[in-house]
Image: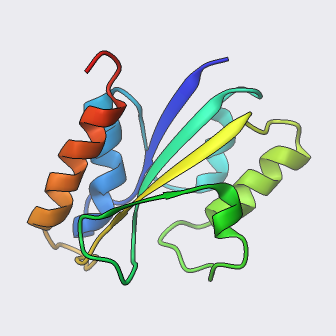
């Protein structure tokens, strides 16, 4: 059983690149595109940590720790083609479910195409990447 770190997002949309940058810095998988391909990123029984930017009423740069159950009933608004809860359910149905899933959402404020990452989110990326880097 391994721990697999996956960052999600879009570098061209400001704070939405936070998960990708965390994964790059911490030696994880920077995943861009259709979330259905996440199924090939882990083996059944692995522990998975997913980092993504979120739009939330909290202060920009704050980090929310979520589990898959926290996503149930959430609006299916996403910059991804398939929502994360759907991918995790599909993994379960196909017998490819990870043993555990931990989701870290970095609250963003700039998601417009062409915008730069906000200072608050960049600071959160540093903190989260350090916390997830083996041996750090």
Q: Name the residue at the left extreme.
A: 119
**Residue shown at 57% from the left, 46% from the top:** 102
| Snapshot quadrant of residue 58 | bottom left
- Depth check: give the residue in front, 48 or 35: 48
Is 94 on the left or on the right of 56, as rendered?
right
For the question of whether residue 117 can be seen, the reply is no
Residue 46: % across, % down = 67, 27
Q: Work out whether residue 60 or residue 27 is closer to the camera in this orientation and state it.
A: 60
Give the camera-side residue of 107 and 9.
107
Q: Quadrant of residue 82?
A: bottom right
User: Residue at coordinates 22% horizontally, 77% vertically from top-left?
Assistant: 110
* 12 is higher (above) or lower (below) than 32: below
Is residue 56 placed above or below 82 in the rendered structure? below
Q: Position of residue 71 (x, y in %)?
A: 65, 68
Compared across the picture, whether 80 is left or right of 16 comes to right
- The percent position of residue 135, horizontal first and vertical second, equals 30, 15
The quadrant of the rendering that contains the N terminus is: top right
Question: Number of numbered discs present?
Answer: 0
> Residue 136 placed where, x, y %?
25, 21
Query: In the rendered image of this protein, does residue 54 appear above or below residue 29?
Result: below
- Whether residue 33 is visible here, answered yes or no, is yes
Question: Left or right: where does residue 79 sit relative to residue 63?
Answer: right
Query: What residue do we see at 31% from left, 30% from top?
Result: 26
């Amino acid at each position: 059983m391994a721990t697999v770190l996956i960052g999600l997002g879009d570098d061209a949309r400001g704070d939405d690149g936070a998960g990708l940058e965390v994964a790059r810095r911490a030696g994880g998988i920077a995943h861009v595109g259709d979330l259905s391909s996440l199924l090939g990123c882990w083996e059944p029984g692995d522990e998975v940590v997913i980092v993504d930017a979120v739009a939330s009423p909290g202060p920009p740069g704050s980090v929310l720790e979520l589990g898959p159950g926290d996503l149930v009933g959430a609006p299916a608004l996403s910059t991804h083609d398939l929502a994360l809860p759907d991918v995790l359910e599909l993994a379960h149905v196909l017998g490819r479910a990870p043993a555990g899933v931990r989701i870290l959402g970095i609250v963003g404020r700039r998601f417009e195409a062409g915008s730069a990452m906000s200072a608050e989110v960049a600071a959160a990326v540093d903190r989260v990447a350090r916390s997830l880097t083996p041996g750090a």
